[in-house]
Amino acid sequence: MSDTAPSTRAAPADPASVQVPIAEVTDLMARTCTAAGVPDGAGRRVADHFLTGELRGKPSHGLAKFAFESRLFPERQAPPEIVRKRGAFAVVDAHREIGPLSAHFATAAAIERARRLGVGLVGVINTQRYGVLSTFTEAIAAHGLIGIAANTSRPEAVPAGGATPVLGVNPLSFALPTLGEPVSADMGTTLAPMGVLWEHRRSGRPLPEQCFVDADGRTTRDPHAASSAIVFGDHRGFALSLLLQTLTGSLFGFPMGRDVDSTWSTGYAFIALDPTFAAPDANAAAANTRLADQLRTAAAADGTWRMPGDRGRAREAAARRTGTIPVPVPLLARLSARAAGDFTSD
């Protein structure tokens, strides 16, 4: 949509938001990428990535994260580059590339290695951040491979009862190939992502209950007093978070814990596994489909749980059918400013 074209927005019941055509939102993000010097095709990939997070019901990893992360877009230096490789392993220096583009490069490298060697393990450093991880694991699964993605962050998470952050928020995604859409999961290891804290600081709204603590380890809903997110699942979640920290850290020689001091020292891992190497006569996609069908039947019978990924994809499909999404007015203003080339205000 051009600067002079009439808007087709309609005001929803919530006066703090407006319904905006998906095409218009996509255009704002694409124009932001153009203003940062990103080629058109790559810019559309970035826009589609963050839009997917929004449409799947993860606003902390959708448009708001795009508005936040796009402040760094002009800092990109060069295309990602494999700087170390051995067998199934590769280490990528992203040269401060935009997160979805770095992850796309790493995903392709992991797929290539898995096709050749049965497994591909690719670590990425010196990159900007992305939104949802499932974009990349589902891309791996689309090739008939099992996809796993994870990343660390600065020390921003504590176990329940803790006050001193050492681990990052350490999200995880996996995707399994099936005869249809992949079965995928995308989860953080904290009860709420740090993106929720940043957005609530901006709006002044209270934080969700029992998700963040202050510097003394007391739970708080005050976004200005909160300093760390709480790891889910008590000691079990803490153990999983610790594993992910090493998977995205020491496995590739990347910083961990308090040595992660910026966006550029944050580590990422992309793993692709080819089941045909272990079971050449089996059909992993068909087996995963049967398992998923059994689980969905059980979920419908029990009525209290659901398959991971199903609700998000259903939300995305419904939003694309309507063609519009609600966008908070202040966020829409931030997106418009980015599209006009303003990468400093927030």
Image (cartoon, rainbow, N blue to C red):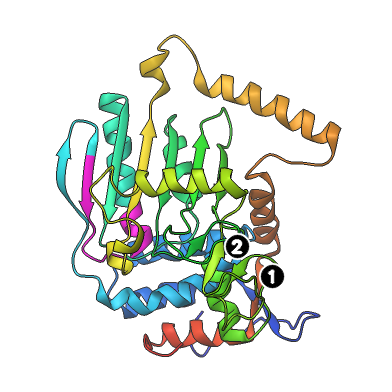
Q: In this view, does 140 lie above or below 165?
A: above
Q: Where is residue 339 in the image (x, y as percent from the top left)?
A: 43, 83
Badge 2, how many Cα within 10 Å: few under 14, some, many 20+? many
Q: Where is residue 49 in the image (x, y as percent from the top left)?
A: 47, 59
- Look at 35% across and 45% down and name the residue there: 246
Q: Callout 2, which amino acid? A: Ala
Residue 160 on the magenta span: no
**How many numbered marks does the figure carry?**
2
Q: Callout 1, which amino acid? A: Pro
Badge 1, how many Cα within 10 Å: few under 14, some, many 20+? some
Q: Which of 6 and 58 is in front in this view?
A: 58
Residues tagged 1 and 2 counted as in contact (Cβ below 8 A)? yes
The kind of secondary structure element at disc 1 is loop
- Look at 36% across and 73% down and name the residue there: 33
**Res. 270 image quadrant:** top left
Q: Where is residue 44 in the image (x, y as percent from the top left)?
A: 41, 64
- Look at 57% across and 78% down and name the residue there: 199
Magenta region, residue range: 90-103
Q: In this view, does 110 lie above or below 155?
A: above
- Look at 31% across and 56% down and name the residue there: 102
